[in-house]
Image (cartoon, rainbow, N blue to C red):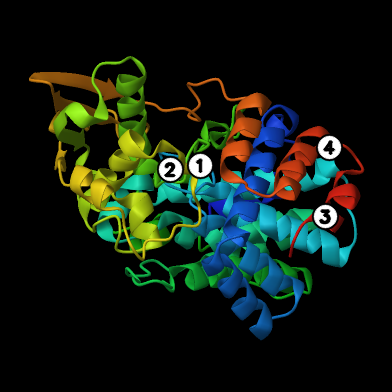
Amino acid sequence: MALPGGTTLPLAVWANWAATSHPACVTSFGRVMLADGVLAQQAGARTLEGQNLRAWICKHDPTWLGQAAANSAVMRLSEVDSIHRASAVTPCALTLPVALAHGRHHGQVTGDALMKAIIVGQELAIRLALALGGASQLMHGVWPSYVVAPLAAAATVGRLRGLTPQRMQHALALALASAACQPGRPMGQRPGRWMLFAQAVRAGAWCAMAAEDGLEGDVALLGEAWISGMAPVAPQATWLNHGWDEPLEVTKTSIKPHCSAKQGLSAIFGLQQMLAQGDFSPEAVTRVEVGVPKAYAAMLDREPGWASRLASMVSSPWQLALTALAPADLDLVERDLSTPDATLRTWSTMVTVHHDASLETYYPTQWPARLRVHAGGQVHERLVLDSPGDPSFHWDEAELLDKAARILHHASDRALVKQVLSLAGKPQFLSDFCTHLET
């Protein structure tokens, strides 16, 4: 569809690419990311919070849509799933569970087709978030992954179902109309944010099914007016007409080496390096100053790490205490905080987080941290721009299997990750794999 004067609507271009493209990154990039997504889903499914959430969702919606939504939320709450820094989108949680649930219910597709559908959904999600202002939205209470979840799921399911570019337009248009903006900050031991996330993913999958059946959306919706209305600050509408040349944005996605909010991983890596080099011992530390961009300075020190499971994965003081005194606990997805360790609590009080204006030039392409550690009468400083799992680091199958060994405590879960690495992209992948995947 074209605008007056012959200009093609952005959504028509997006839909055509989603329905017909053959991304080159499917085999080289997709296999490791797919396995990392399975790792995250299995890790989240083993937590009590994940089990309760999945049971609740599937009780109220026992269809494949409910299974897809539940598994997406379970993957996301694990906090070990991948993230694209510039957009702040966690793309695998938006697409992989939907693709697998659809495959189990509606019949098998080849591994190649499955991976193309996942990559398509992830790329559109990242581009939409970038158009809305990317990671800068976080400072204004916007959760980018939540906003773009319907679009990602709709594109993934639409591609799996072979929607034509015209029907894909309507699937994406309906998904855009389903997008919400600010979920607030649900707190407590069972925060409702994961239920909201599941609902957003389910909505997108449903939109693809509706479009296939002939329901129509407003295909002119994706434009500068809609972007400006959804974005609280600094929308980047140029992303609406960005080219589709390789490499795609999705290939810049980061894998998380530990169970942590991505914003805290640079500080963790910096302290790990200092300790490994013998700069000081944990017992010698008297103060730690963590400088970060303004966008996440408050976030990293908002709550004490023992306030909740989620807080323990966000609080930089708590995470650095674990790095120094209990490094294996950084890989715990299930966390018992009923009686927090007194030594960890004391060490964490030595850590302060502040805004370092000199780091703004790197953000949001990189999420840096500057550490100043006072120990033994000396001050040790380190600037960290990237951490393991970022595109600048070599991260291959060996690193992923090491992550699985550290995070997954069930042999069957580790075997599942290894199976994905060996089968992904092969024609028999889905049929051989789905029978072993928990739903």
- Number of callouts in the render? 4
Given residues 207 and 28, the one toward you in this image is: 28
Among numbered discs 4 and 3, the one appearing first in the sequence: 4
- The answer to which of marks 2 and 4 sits earlier in the sequence is 2
Separation of marks 4 and 3 at Cα, in angstroms: 13 Å
Kindly identify the amino acid type of the residue bearing the numbered disc 2: Leu
Disc 1 to disc 4, how far (Cα)?
35 Å
Write the residue at 51% across / 30% down. Answer: 389
Q: Is residue 261 visible?
A: yes
Residue 31's disc number: none
Q: Residue at x 7, y 20 (%)?
A: 377
> At label 3, which amino acid type do we have?
His
Coordinates of residue 229 in the picture (x, y in percent): 35, 63
Q: Mark 2 or mark 3: which comes first in sequence?
A: 2
Q: Quadrant of residue 111?
A: top right
Residue at image mark 2: 330
Discs 2/3, front = 2
Residue labelled with disc 3: 436
Other residues around mark 3 within 10 Å, as few (<14) / some (14–19) / many (≥20) = few
Q: Are marks 4 and 3 in contact (CB under 8 Å)?
A: no
Residue at image mark 1? 241
Q: Residue 250 location in percent, x, y?
A: 57, 37
Residue named by callout 4: 423
Which of labels 1 and 2 is toward the front? 2
**Dots 2, 4 in contact, CB < 8 A:** no
User: Is tag 1's residue or tag 2's residue first in the polypeptide sequence?
Assistant: 1
